[in-house]
């Protein structure tokens, strides 16, 4: 299996932490972060205020990599607009995948 396909497979099936995003507890925590950050992207240089909360992400500042404490730590979360999260943040995390290894 090719590296990209293998990486994709691990990304899709991931560890048990993937299910945490589907819980009511996560939804409440996500909402608290969005409200705390005034629905404003915290990425340096962006500052976009987004009225449509579906276009905002409660982003883990330090990647949790399945660490339950980091995942649920509100101080480790920030509000990002989807553009900054999907382009900047995810690209930065993906660029280090080779050196840090696949995590799930």
Image: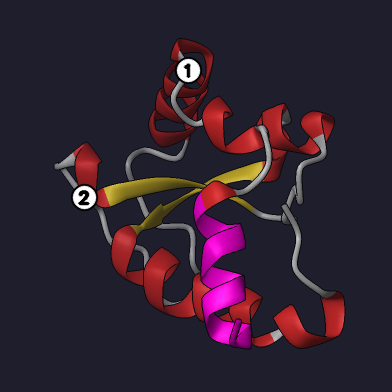
Say if 41 sits above or below 96 in the image: above
Left or right: residue 30 versus residue 81 is right
Residue at left offset 45%, top offset 40%: 37
Determine which residue is flagged by label 1.
Answer: 23
**Mark 1 Cα-neighbour bin, 10 Å: few <14, some 14–19, many ≥20:** few
Q: Position of residue 75 (x, y in %)?
A: 71, 36
Task: Give the alpha-carbon distance from disc 2 to disc 1, as whole Å.
Answer: 23 Å
Say if 57 sits above or below 88 in the image: above
Residue at left offset 82%, top offset 39%: 67
Rendered image: mark on residue 50: 2
Is 7 covered by the magenta stretch? yes
Q: Residue most toward the top?
A: 24
Label 2 sits on a secondary structure element that is: loop
Q: Range of the magenta residues?
A: 1-12
Left or right: residue 13 versus residue 71 is left
Is 75 covered by the magenta stretch? no
Residue at left offset 36%, top offset 63%: 47
Please identify the quadrant where the N terminus is shown.
bottom right
Say if 35 sits above or below 39 in the image: above
Q: How is the image coloured?
A: secondary structure
């Amino acid at each position: 299996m090719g590296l990209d396909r293998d990486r994709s497979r691990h990304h899709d099936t991931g560890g048990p932490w993937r299910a945490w995003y589907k819980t009511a507890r996560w939804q409440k925590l996500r909402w608290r972060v969005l409200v705390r950050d005034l629905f404003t992207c915290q990425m340096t240089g962006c500052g976009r205020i987004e009225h449509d909360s579906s276009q905002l992400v409660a982003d883990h500042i330090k990647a949790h990599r399945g660490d339950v404490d980091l995942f649920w730590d509100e101080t480790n979360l920030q509000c990002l607009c989807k553009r900054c999260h999907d382009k900047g943040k995810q690209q930065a995390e993906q660029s280090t995948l080779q050196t840090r290894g696949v995590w799930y």
